[in-house]
Amino acid sequence: MIGISKLYCGTVEPSDVLRYGAKSGALPSELLQFSADKKPVVVWNCTRRCNLRCAHCYSASSDRDYPDEMTTDQARAMLEDLASFGVPVVLLSGGEPLMRPDLAQLASCAVESGMRAVVSTNGTRITPENAGQLREAKISYVGVSLDGLEATNDAFRGRKGAFAEAITGIRNCRQAGIKVGLRFTITRRNAGELPEIFKLLEDENIPRVCFYHLVGVGRGEAMAQDKLDHDATRRAVDLIIDSTADMHRRGLRKEVLTVDNHADGAYLYLRMVREGNPRAPDVLELLRMNGGNSSGVGIGCVSWDGQVHPDQFWRHVSLGNVRRRAFSAIWTDLSNPLLAKLKNKSEHVKGRCAACRFLDICGGNLRVRAEATTGDTWAPDPACYLTDGEIFAPPEREND
């Protein structure tokens, strides 16, 4: 997760992080990505059922009953263990989490245990009533997935009317006083609508947006033709940076992030160097605090059936099950060879990743994407769009 607005627009400094000791338990949510201890944010896919059928869904969810979902009591026990372990945030996802009738109850349990609870949703089921329930549960944030304007989004979601329903859900959250933002996955189909997404932020007074790079797992595995090439990715990231800066200059302090391609951090830094931005060294320091991809370290996943994964995309790999063993015990058990290697990726990545001067701020990018594309978990991530000249150039050449 790369905080474009924080880094490029200077809304955070290294001293802001150090003031809190860089500990995840002490840091406010907007600084959590820079924590030194990397206690995992846990994505809990609390249900697999979903009222939509999104083209890029990593869990391949649909509108039917799935067997073996965790009970309320089992979920409570897991949440209490997560809190005791020091997990700062639990992200309630799906499927569509609002199809789980005890969602607000479990969110309250998470918050009462000392964690922040956030919801990732398609937004179509957020009524004024359940928005009020989420407010009462003290949900910190609701992220609503929109992958374009009406026609594009509805095509992604597999249902006409999904865009209008999601916008209504966003308005219901805002009316209830809940912080709400957008989640947008960039593909060939919708990259041309990025300017309209920034306009939507303004028109609907939405304070936050996360732009996700496509990860080809689940139903997304069939979207190879929709992935941006490297040049198109660079253009999209430049547009995101430019649009963020434009809003900042006009006094619109929106939070803008990119997710699932940590080459974005190095690219942002190199752009600031080219522009002669005096904040470039501070941004490099913050990117090192961030540390890049954190699968198996600062991000983990628990599925609807209790299986633990290194992140939400590693669905084919189970590290254990919270019904039989606590998450805290599973997460710290390095007898699993994949988990052990993920906790020290720099020793295992190959090729240009191993020699890249930005390895400490990228973390080797997404290992699951490398595996899905090449069959080798430790091969270079093909989504890295930095040139050999950029990753191998000595630092002193950056100002040439």
Image (tube, rainbow, N blue to C red):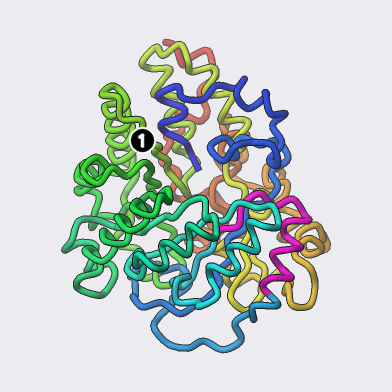
Q: In the picture, residue 162 is in which quadrant?
A: bottom left
Residue 40: x percent and y percent?
A: 67, 51
Q: Secondary structure at mark 1?
A: loop
Closer to the camera in the image, 126 or 154: 126
Give the residue drawn at x 70%, y 42%.
25
Q: In the picture, residue 75 is in which quadrant?
A: bottom right
The 10 Å Cα crowd at callout 1, few under 14, some 14 to 19, many 20 or more, is: many
Q: Residue furthest left?
A: 151
Q: Left or right: where does residue 330 sit relative to residue 46?
A: right
Q: Check disc 1 and give the amino acid type.
A: Lys
Give the residue drawn at x 19%, y 45%.
196
Give the residue drawn at x 67%, y 23%.
19
Residue position marked by numbered label 1 in the rendering? 254
Closer to the camera in the image, 400 or 85: 85
In the image, residue 399 sits, relative to residue 136, either above or below, namely above
Based on the picture, tell me whether residue 76 belongs to the magenta stretch.
yes
Numbered disc total: 1
Main SS type for the magenta part?
A: helix
For the record, the magenta segment spans 75-91
Residue 152: x percent and y percent?
A: 20, 61
Based on the picture, tell me whether residue 209 belongs to the magenta stretch.
no
Residue 207: x percent and y percent?
A: 36, 41
Residue 160: x percent and y percent?
A: 19, 73
In the image, residue 186 sits, relative to residue 169, either above or below, namely above
Position of the C terminus, as image quadrant, is: top left
Q: Left or right: where does residue 3 sit relative to residue 89?
A: left
Closer to the camera in the image, 329 or 88: 88
